[in-house]
Image (tube, rainbow, N blue to C red):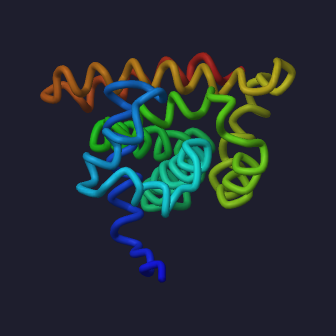
């Protein structure tokens, strides 16, 4: 008779996967992920039947964790730049506070292991955030470019900003402000 699964163990496996994959890449072994969560490798497969299932669950977990952080800072702003600035700051803060999540999510975003179905399901849960991002893209003409370009520009600049904030926290606010100014000046017509 199979023992019931616990949510705590599932979360521990996902957080271990994020930490190990941030350091070793998506090819990290399931044995090291299980060890990081303090369970046997067989236990990992009770929660995630295959490594691909783990990738998709991890993508969902990280995206929803990020969305929760962004939503905490989504206030009503009179201007689009105010809304985008609030999301930018929250995104940078999340990346700095959750560096392994950020690094692993960046790998999963471009991985073919995350299914279109998972991406679609997650996107449907982020419609409020996507609405602001879409307004920003519409405002700057980036929608005429191939899909994902505006997101890639945002991600590259955010990653650079996060690296500098982590390296020099005393000047973190200055880096966040400068990163946003570069993004916004390149985004607005």
The residue closer to the viewer here, 177 or 88, is 88
The residue at 49%/63% (across/down) is 46
Q: In which quarter of the image is residue 128?
A: bottom right
Task: Pinpoint residue 49: horizontal percent, then vertical percent.
Answer: 58, 55
The residue at 56%/26% (across/down) is 154
Q: In this view, does 145 lie above or below 108?
A: above
The residue at 48%/49% (across/down) is 62
Task: Pinpoint residue 75: horizontal percent, then vertical percent.
Answer: 50, 60
Q: In this view, does 183 lie above or below 132?
A: above
Residue at the right extreme of this rendering: 144
Task: Pinpoint residue 82: horizontal percent, then vertical percent.
Answer: 52, 44
Q: In this view, does 5 lie to the left or right of 76?
A: left
Q: In which quarter of the image is residue 13?
A: bottom left
Q: Is residue 175 left or right of residue 45?
A: left
Q: Is residue 144 left or right of residue 28?
A: right
Q: Quadrant of residue 29?
A: top left
Task: Pinpoint residue 4: horizontal percent, then vertical percent.
Answer: 44, 81
The residue closer to the viewer here, 155 or 30, is 30
The C terminus sits in image quarter: top right
Q: Is residue 75 above or below residue 168?
A: below
């Amino acid at each position: 008779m199979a023992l019931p699964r616990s949510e705590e163990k599932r979360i521990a496996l996902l957080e271990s996967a994020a930490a190990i994959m941030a350091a070793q890449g998506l090819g990290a072994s399931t044995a090291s992920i299980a060890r990081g969560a303090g369970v046997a490798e067989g236990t990992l497969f009770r929660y995630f039947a295959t490594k691909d299932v783990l990738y998709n669950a991890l993508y969902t977990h990280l995206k929803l964790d990020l969305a929760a952080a962004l939503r905490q800072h989504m206030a009503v702003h009179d201007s689009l730049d105010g809304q985008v600035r609030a999301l930018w700051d929250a995104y940078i803060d999340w990346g700095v506070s959750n560096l392994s999540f950020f690094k692993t999510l960046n790998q999963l975003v471009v991985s073919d292991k995350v299914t279109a179905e998972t991406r679609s399901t997650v996107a449907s849960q982020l419609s409020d955030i996507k609405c602001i991002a879409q307004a920003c893209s519409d405002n700057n003409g980036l929608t005429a470019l191939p899909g994902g370009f505006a997101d890639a520009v945002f991600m590259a600049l955010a990653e650079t900003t996060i690296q500098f904030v982590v390296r020099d926290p005393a000047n973190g606010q200055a880096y966040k402000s400068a990163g946003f100014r570069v993004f916004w000046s390149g985004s607005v017509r």
